[in-house]
Image (cartoon, rainbow, N blue to C red):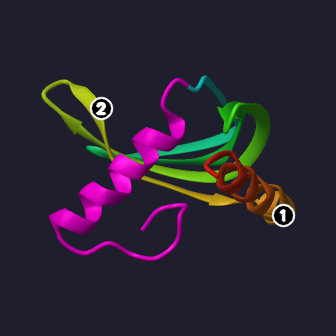
Amino acid sequence: MNPYGGREVGWEQVRAAWERAAQDYSGSQTTITLRDPLIRVVGDLAYEVGSEVGAVTFAGQTVSFEQRVTNVYRREAGGWKMVHHHIDINPAEQERYRQQQSLKGQAGQ
């Protein structure tokens, strides 16, 4: 599952989604800060929730964003490895995301 919608099953579908994302964000700049993080550790497993706040250059325009985030980590070989990352768009930001998608569509025409 990804921000473009839908769900990919199998390598061909997953690869196509990653290729599309790589093309859409090629040459872009992104700045992300984690705000209000809550981190809990239980043994070799940890999770973190908060808000990612930042800006991305998308379709030639810089757009700010705020999204809720959940990350899951596992301790391996003396370090922490992210094993899951999930974001969802803050409901107040959903309209802005739709506008970004519209800009992207216009830039590609």
Q: Nearer the viewer, residue 22 or 83?
A: 22
Task: Please determine whether, in this image, residue 9 is positioned above or below residue 61.
Answer: below
**How would you rate the neighbour count of disc 2 (Cα within 10 Å): few for under 14, some for 14-19, many for 20 or more?**
some
Residue 13, given in percent of the width and then of the height, sits at 26, 67
Judged from this view, the residue extending furthest toward the front is 109
Task: Please determine whether, in this image, residue 108 is positioned above or below residue 13.
Answer: above
The answer to whether one can see residue 53 in this image is: yes
Q: Nearer the viewer, residue 94 or 40?
A: 94
Q: Regarding mark 1 in the picture, which secondary structure is present there?
A: helix
Q: Regarding mark 2 in the picture, which secondary structure is present there?
A: strand
Amino acid, disc 1: Glu
Residue 59, given in percent of the width and then of the height, sits at 67, 39
The residue wearing badge 2 is 80
Residue 25, given in percent of the width and then of the height, sits at 52, 36
User: Where is residue 82, by image quadrant?
Assistant: top left
Residue at x 48%, y 31% (from the top left corner): 26
User: Where is residue 57, by image quadrant?
Assistant: top right
Q: Earlier in the sequence, mark 1 or mark 2?
A: 2
Task: Please determine whether, in this image, residue 79 is positioned above or below residue 43.
Answer: above
Image mark count: 2
Residue at x 18%, y 24% (from the top left corner): 78
Question: Could you say which disc has been placed on residue 95 in the image?
Answer: 1
Between the residue at mark 1 and the residue at mark 2, the CA separation in whole angstroms equals 35 Å
Q: Magenta residues?
A: 1-27
Question: Could you say which disc has been placed on residue 11 in the image?
Answer: none
Task: Please tell me whether residue 79 belongs to the stretch shown in magenta.
Answer: no
